[in-house]
Image (tube, rainbow, N blue to C red):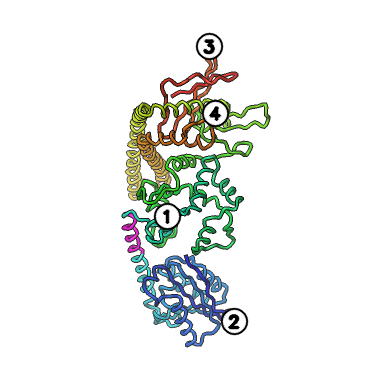
Amino acid sequence: MRNQSTINKIPFAEGDETALYTRLSRDDELTGESNSIKNQRELLLQYAKSKGYANVQVYVDDGYSGTNFNRPDFKRMMERVEAGLIKRVIVKDMSRFGRNYLEVGYYTEVIFPEYDVQFIAVNDNVDSEVQTDNDFTPFRNIMNEWYAKDISKKMKSAIKAKGNSGKHTNPLPPYGYIKDPNDKNKWLIDEEAATVVRRIFGLCMQGFGPSQISRILTDEGIDTPKIHAKKMGRKVTIRANEMPEAWADQTVGAILGYWEYLGWTVNFKTKKKSFKSKKVILLPSDEWQVFKDTQEPIIDEETFWAVQKIREGKRRLDSLGEPNALSGMLFCGDCGHRLYLRRQRNPHQKDYFVCSVYRKKRKYFCTSHFIRLEDIEKILLRDLRQVTTFAREHESEFLDLAKKRSLRETEKLRAENKASLDKAVRRIAEIDGIIQKLYEDNVSGKISDERFVKMAATYEAEQDGLQQTAQRLKDEISAVREEGESVDRFMKLVNKYSDITELNAEIIRTFVEKIIVYEAEKNDGIKTQRVKIVYNCVGTVSVPNADNEPVKTDKTKIIEVA
């Protein structure tokens, strides 16, 4: 967005300033040169001179829509109006002041008269000191707003047609890509920036969150997207008090979420409630328009989706302030909540995981599900090596095994979720009917206004909760469907990591979705603890001829279960 403050620096007396306001938006540029800032300025200066107005100051907002009154120079001008420093405001026409008839009317009919400010729209023959000239002004404001609405509708239609055709609707490609100089609809990899993007994804796979990554990149002096764009010759706006050399957590978070890095075109991710509103609403991903293989990918699918799963849950540092590869991945087999890693400062004591619910609320709600970090690492490494080795050496058998299991679990979970979803949808419809009946009873006088408000609020709260549940179930059904179709992706991971000799954050996050830990049980004096490993793409896997001997500790046998 372009914004320049152009001030005609003529000395002025306080309270006697003549403000010449000019504005141009990108939409207005389509109407030709007549609305240019230069022409507006010249016309207004000539008009002020012909009227003998002195102490002139020019205010410029270049690149701002008429429906947006949060414009820098407009706000500066109004601050001076409210300070009693401006005697009159002159614009080329009403549309230059704004295209929201309510806002324009508020300023011209309320604010300016309150501060004794004369308002003039030259080409519309509007002068607040000549009452007869102002009778048609409200209708002009309505017509200007209608024009803005019409332009917005036409632009939306053009963007929709472009987006549905598979072309990028973003005016600029995300960091890591540049426009093809020979084809503006085609993106090319900017290798310098793409290297940083890959680094960010790699750090996330290693267990670092956005705030940690941003600090690492800043400390290493890596150019931020704004600095990089500026060096590439692009026009960059840097806000006051902004530190462009420092990476922002939000920037890193946004980079980690761009589907475009898969080589896809993703359109219609956001919307606005109306052409007047500047608030951007993020739409759910199932409403996006996605076209695959439209440009060269920067991040492979396996890494990208592994990162998305990592970011679904909050990443926490352990008690020593360090990230752990397994942190946030262990879940209680009874209450379903995460297990927390407790680091020991004493070198003679060993780090362990414990149920978060038990740790916070003790035995009244759950049990400890205590398990040592080194034990879970041992059983995970052994199982991961067995599964990947079998998959690599017996690929067709493994694919058949995994697909059958996946299909079985998929159908079971889908049926369960579908039943729950249908129940939630029916109840939502029932509540609609109940609220409608309450409204009718209130109108007829059967129930009081107070009782109506209280009862309606209760049912609406229930309905909101059900709608959230319904959306979650829809997402889970969709995710299950994807899992049933993603077994082949697991083989890509197996071939990518051909020989796993030790665990690290990248390997764990790439292969493992979660680990479920059950409470230890004691039978015949022998303490046994079950662990279930759930892999990305294929879920739980039990391969033939695997070494399923338990991991023995000094007190407990730990066994994995499929």
**Circle 4 sits on which residue?**
377
Can residue 370 be seen at all in this image of the molecule? no
**Of the numbered discs in the image, which one, if any, rests on residue 188?**
1
State the image coordinates of residue 91 (x, y, percent, origin top left): 45, 77
**Nearer-the-camera pick, 353 or 432:** 353
Q: Is the magenta stretch mostly helix, strand or loop?
A: helix
Residue 455 appears in which quarter of the rendering? top left
Instruction: Tell me the kind of residue under disc 2.
Output: Pro
Q: Which of marks 4 and 1 is nearer the N terminus?
A: 1
In this picture, is 554 found above or below 405?
above
**Of the numbered discs in the image, which one, if any, rests on residue 524?**
3
Q: Are marks 3 and 2 in contact (CB under 8 Å)?
A: no
Residue depth check, mark 1 versus mark 2: number of the one nearer the observer: 1
Can residue 147 be seen at all in this image of the molecule? yes
Residue depth check, mark 4 versus mark 1: number of the one nearer the observer: 1
Name the secondary structure under disc 1. Answer: strand
Q: Which of marks 3 and 1 is nearer the N terminus?
A: 1
Queried whether the magenta region covers residue 32, the answer comes back as no
Queried whether the magenta region covers residue 156, the answer comes back as yes
